[in-house]
Image: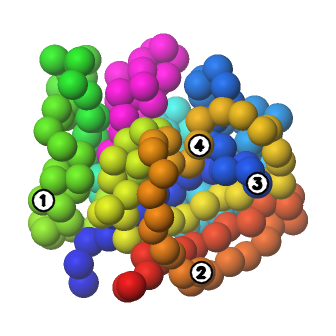
Amino acid sequence: MPRKLVYFVAVTLDGFIAGPDRGDPSGTPYLPVPQDLIEVLVGEYPETLPAPARQALGVEGPGNVFDTVLEGRASYELGLAAGLTNAYPHLRHIVFSTSMTTSPDPSVEVVAADPAATARTLKAENGRDIWIVGGGTLAYALLPEIDRLILKQHPTVISSGVPLFDGPFVTRRFHLRDQRALGSGIRILVFDRASN
């Protein structure tokens, strides 16, 4: 089965993945991480938890879905500001940047090449799926290569911030593959890229 490029991210009802300050949205009032979402992450997507959370929750071993994570420089720098040079040491970690010349961590690959071309190369390799963790600018650059969206849609509206895809107008079609509602009001929505 070919590898998929998957954008797995928390998003507000109005399509934002972070607030106007572009800071870390995890656990904010508009993108909280309630217990039922933690249970989904631990049970189904444990590799998407950063190392400190994995340690606190006693999560070990390889992931269920992903073995590689792709991240934009701005998103990566949020982890650096929190003292994490590699939030995902259990995954192959690739950061896209044209301004960062060296990696702060020997296990993090810094890539200046075109993200879409890099994603095509990665998808042709053997392995599990590839996770786009953020942010919106990188997701936009990778949009032609994205095979699946897994959205943790929160029942909040913030009206401004970092959009799910941050770039000029473009149209891409996806079809709904699966959905479920958690007791907290969060919906897990899975969309696959439409074939036409």
Which stretch appears magenta? Answer: 69-91
Res 58 seen here:
no
Q: Please state which amino acid type lies under the numbered disc 2.
A: Leu
**Residue drawn where x is 82% and y is 45% of the image:** 157
Q: Pointer 3: what residue?
A: 13
Q: Is residue 113 left or right of residue 31?
A: left
Q: Element at badge 2?
A: strand
**Disc number lying in front (3 or 1):** 3
Q: How many residues crowd around disc 3 within 10 Å: few (fewer than 14), some, or many (20 or more)?
A: some
Q: Please state which amino acid type lies under the numbered disc 3.
A: Leu
* Marks 1/2: CA–CA distance: 27 Å
Q: Pointer 2: what residue?
A: 176
User: Would you say the residues marked 4 and 3 are in contact, meaning their CB atoms lie under 8 Å apart?
Assistant: no
Q: In which quarter of the image is the C terminus?
A: bottom left
Q: Please state which amino acid type lies under the numbered disc 4.
A: Pro
Q: Element at badge 1?
A: helix
- Estimate the x, y position of residue 98 in percent, counting from the top left: 21, 25
Q: How many residues crowd around disc 1 within 10 Å: few (fewer than 14), some, or many (20 or more)?
A: few
Q: Pointer 1: what residue?
A: 121
Q: Please state which amino acid type lies under the numbered disc 1.
A: Thr
Tell me which numbered mark, 1 or 2, is placed earlier along the sequence.
1
**Residue drawn where x is 45% and y is 42% of the image:** 167
